[in-house]
Image (spheres, rainbow, N blue to C red):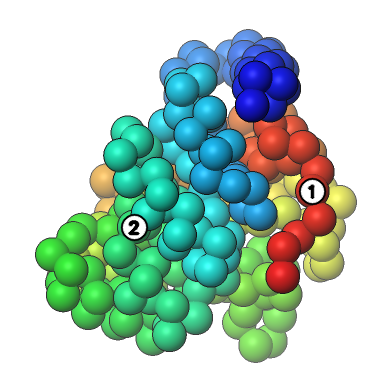
Amino acid sequence: MTDRRTQLAGNLAKVEERIVAACAAAGRPRDEVTLIVVTKTYPASDVRILSELGVRQVGENRDQDAAPKAAACADLPLEWHFIGQLQTNKVRSVVGYADFVQSVDRDRLVTALSREAVRAGREVGCLLQVALDAGASGRGERGGVAPAGIEELAGLVADAPGLRLDGLMTVAPLTGEYAGREQAAFERLVDLSTDLRRTHPAATMVSAGMSADLEQAVAAGATHVRVGSAVLGVRPRLG
């Protein structure tokens, strides 16, 4: 465990150096950018070490990994972000531990989240996942709502009991006009965030960037970066 703590501490320090350098290059204060450590496939023991090292924001992609881990770490001062594609049959479980759901992308999911948040007596922060590769279907390869659908979906979240509209999230697209142009994609998300805040001024979160492209996200104006492998290492997916 001591070796793992040393490894995680070293990796966290390297990521912190990258964020500090990216903020300096962009002329931004370091405190404008929040690090979310994505612990998917890694055990609760790693989350516990990360908490001891000062991490307060943890991200998860799959409920089957996240639910038991969150329960095992319920005593820790953490905020949990669910960032994967969310099926409505998993909503009750996710609402039980997630402080934020960053992958809200359709009306039916808003309805399910609202119902379960009210049932649980919780307020869940919601980010709309924006698909910058959305085609004719209006959805992207990895989920998300097309930019043209943001306003309507935002209104549904803002009006839904138990939910709070906190901002926008995207994943750099692998296809379409932004493929291979991560910073341009993130700049587009920031522009969309500016538009959203005209009608929803409290929706200030802009979640973009992962291990490989966090610098581009910071340069574009992201408020939150989601880093997994750069902190925890590369590990085969479970299941």
Q: Position of residue 18 (x, y in %)?
A: 70, 19
Q: How many badges with numbers are in the image?
A: 2
Spatial separation of the CA atoms under disc 2 and disc 1: 24 Å
Residue drawn at x 27%, y 46% as measured from the top left: 202
The local crowd at label 1, few if under 14, some if 14 to 19, many if 20 or more residues have their Cα within 10 Å, is few
Amino acid type at mark 2: Tyr
Whether residue 72 is visible to the viewer of this picture, yes or no, is yes
| Label 2 SS | loop
Query: Against 124, is 26 above or below?
Result: above
Query: Which quadrant of the figure has residue 6?
Result: top right
Residue drawn at x 18%, y 68% as measured from the top left: 120
Q: Position of residue 126 (x, y in %)?
A: 36, 59
In the picture, measured across the screen, residue 44 lies left or right of residue 2, that is left
Query: Which quadrant of the figure has residue 91?
Result: bottom left
Residue drawn at x 61%, y 82% as measured from the top left: 138
The local crowd at label 2, few if under 14, some if 14 to 19, many if 20 or more residues have their Cα within 10 Å, is many
- 131 or 104: nearer the eye? 104
Residue drawn at x 81%, y 55% as measured from the top left: 236
Q: Position of residue 121 (x, y in %)?
A: 13, 64
Query: Against 235, is 5 above or below?
Result: above
Q: Between disc 2 and disc 1, whose residue precedes?
A: 2
In the picture, measured across the screen, residue 234 lies left or right of residue 92, that is right
- The residue that mark 2 highlights is 97
| Label 1 SS | loop
Amino acid type at mark 1: Arg
Which quadrant holds the C terminus?
bottom right
Q: Position of residue 50 (x, y in %)?
A: 53, 29
Which quadrant holds the N terminus?
top right
User: CB under 8 Å between callouts 2 and 1?
Assistant: no
- The residue that mark 1 highlights is 235
Whether residue 26 is visible to the viewer of this picture, yes or no, is no
